[in-house]
Amino acid sequence: MLRWVLIFLVVAVIAAIFGFGGIAAGAAGIAKIIFYIFLVLFVISLLMKLLR
């Protein structure tokens, strides 16, 4: 899942460099959402491991 975050982040940076503001904002937004999902799943995984 972190791979997807990095891919969208790179797409956002490249789009921003070439002046495509809308695409850059969209890719950055998607990367942010996927990163938050990753964090939630990671914390749930840690809690499940601690409860075992």
Image (tube, rainbow, N blue to C red):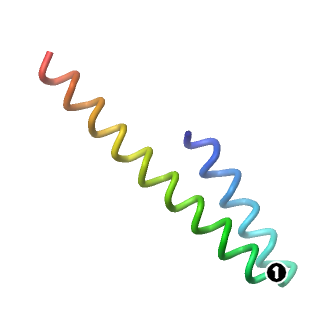
Question: Most extreme residue toward the left, as rendered?
Answer: 51
Question: Most extreme residue toward the top, as rendered?
Answer: 52
Q: Using residue 49 as the reference point, say whether residue 30 is left or right of it.
A: right
Residue 3 vertical position relative to residue 14 in the rendered view, above or below: above
Residue type at mark 1 is Phe
Residue behind mark 1: 20
SS at mark 1 in the image:
loop
Q: Please report the residue visible at 38 percent of the width from the left and 47 percent of the height from the top.
A: 39
Q: Quadrant of residue 50?
A: top left
Residue 26 vertical position relative to residue 22 in the rendered view, above or below: above
Q: Please report the residue visible at 67 percent of the width from the left and 65 percent of the height from the top.
A: 27
Q: Quadrant of residue 26?
A: bottom right
The quadrant of the rendering that contains the N terminus is top right
Q: Using residue 29 as the reference point, say whether residue 16 is left or right of it.
A: right
- Density class for disc 1 (Cα within 10 Å; few <14, some 14-19, many ≥20) is few
Q: Using residue 52 as the reference point, say whether residue 27 is left or right of it.
A: right
The quadrant of the rendering that contains the C terminus is top left
Q: Please report the residue visible at 48 percent of the width from the left and 53 percent of the height from the top.
A: 35
Q: Please report the residue visible at 59 percent of the width from the left and 61 percent of the height from the top.
A: 30
Q: x%, y% of residue 31?
A: 58, 59
